[in-house]
Amino acid sequence: MDSNTDEIAHKFPPFFQVHKDGRVERFMNSVFVPPTIDPQTGVESKDVLISPETGVKARIFLPKINGPDPIKKLPLVVHYHGGGFCLASALSATNAKFLTRLVSEANVVAVSVEYRLAPEHPLPIAFDDSWSAFQWIGTHRNGNGPELCLDRYVDFGRVFLAGESAGATIAHYVAVRVGSTTAGFEGMRVRGMIIVHPYFQGSEPNNMVRFLYPGSSGTDSDPKLNPKADPDLGKMGCEKVLVLVAEKDRLKPGGVEYCETLKNSDWKGDVELVENEGEDHCFHMFNPACENALLLVQKLAAFVNQASE
């Protein structure tokens, strides 16, 4: 047996380790679930292939549709999952529980993007996949896209970006890129963005992120990782931002600083900061039935509904 099989070249607990033969071993693996109809809420999910070339997919969540035609079109939440750019999945049981509850509570359509994970696919591939997915979603804005349920049920004048942890970092990147893009989204309006327990980088060294993103200029100077370093921040293409931080989360200061960065930038929108007292990072994904997780989903739903008016 090759001795390199078990020798470790890089180790980043609690996320992953890389063996000398190149094999990546994750310490937390996603439990995948197929798309289904939730018996309690009636929320229906389905998977779509966005890019045959890259294999990028998405899971669409549709609320229970009541009443006859004409069908009332609904707001759209474009969601990017967390996991440090190297873990988790849009197709996981954890993600399904969260988005099923949000879609039912807010009465929206959600699209959760399955971007490719590092280190097998080094950053910025996750960002590129997420942007490509948003562009694909945008092809439905005139009712002529490849996915019928998006053509039929989505009001593209009421679009929201959302993400937790690294997914929040990606959502912010997409929002800035939307605002910096001059064509291709006519008739599509991003009303707001939901940033939950964001994984923004700053001046502190982060060896894992540097390993996942070997081509980066640095965690403090790369605009994809640090909003303060982004010259296009003032162009961010959404009108309202809701930022949630958790009291016990070591990443809380980055979320608070993000709000201050937005307020002090040329961006003209509104930002709201909410603290989840007594909770840690992404608690709502790991303990979705707890009272504070239910309150969190209610807060997100209220934000979407109010910003949609």
Image (cartoon, grey):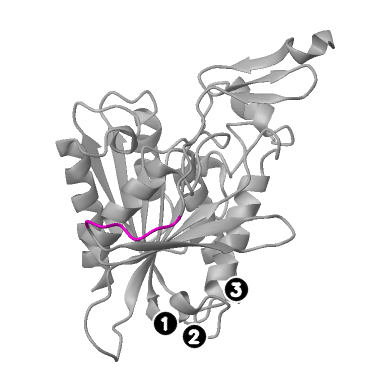
Please identify, in this view, whether the residue under mark 1 or under mark 3 is nearer the observer.
1
Residue 254 is situated, as x and y percent measured from the top left of the image, at: 40, 33
> Could you classify mark 1 by the number of other residues whose Cα lies within 10 Å: few (under 14), some (14-19), or many (20 or more)?
some
Whether tag 1 and tag 2 are in contact, CB under 8 A, the answer is: yes
Earlier-in-chain disc, 3 versus 2: 2
Residue 82 is situated, as x and y percent measured from the top left of the image, at: 46, 40
What's the CA distance linking mark 1 and mark 3? 26 Å
Q: Three-letter amino acid code at disc 3?
A: Thr
| Mark 2 secondary-structure assignment | loop
What's the CA distance linking mark 1 and mark 2? 7 Å
| Mark 1 secondary-structure assignment | helix
Name the residue rendered at 73%, 11% in the picture: 6
Name the residue rendered at 56%, 42% in the picture: 229
Left or right, residue 81 beside residue 297: right
> Could you classify mark 3 by the number of other residues whose Cα lies within 10 Å: few (under 14), some (14-19), or many (20 or more)?
few
Residue that carries the numbered disc 2 in the rendered image? 143
Please identify, in this view, whether the residue under mark 1 or under mark 2 is nearer the observer.
1
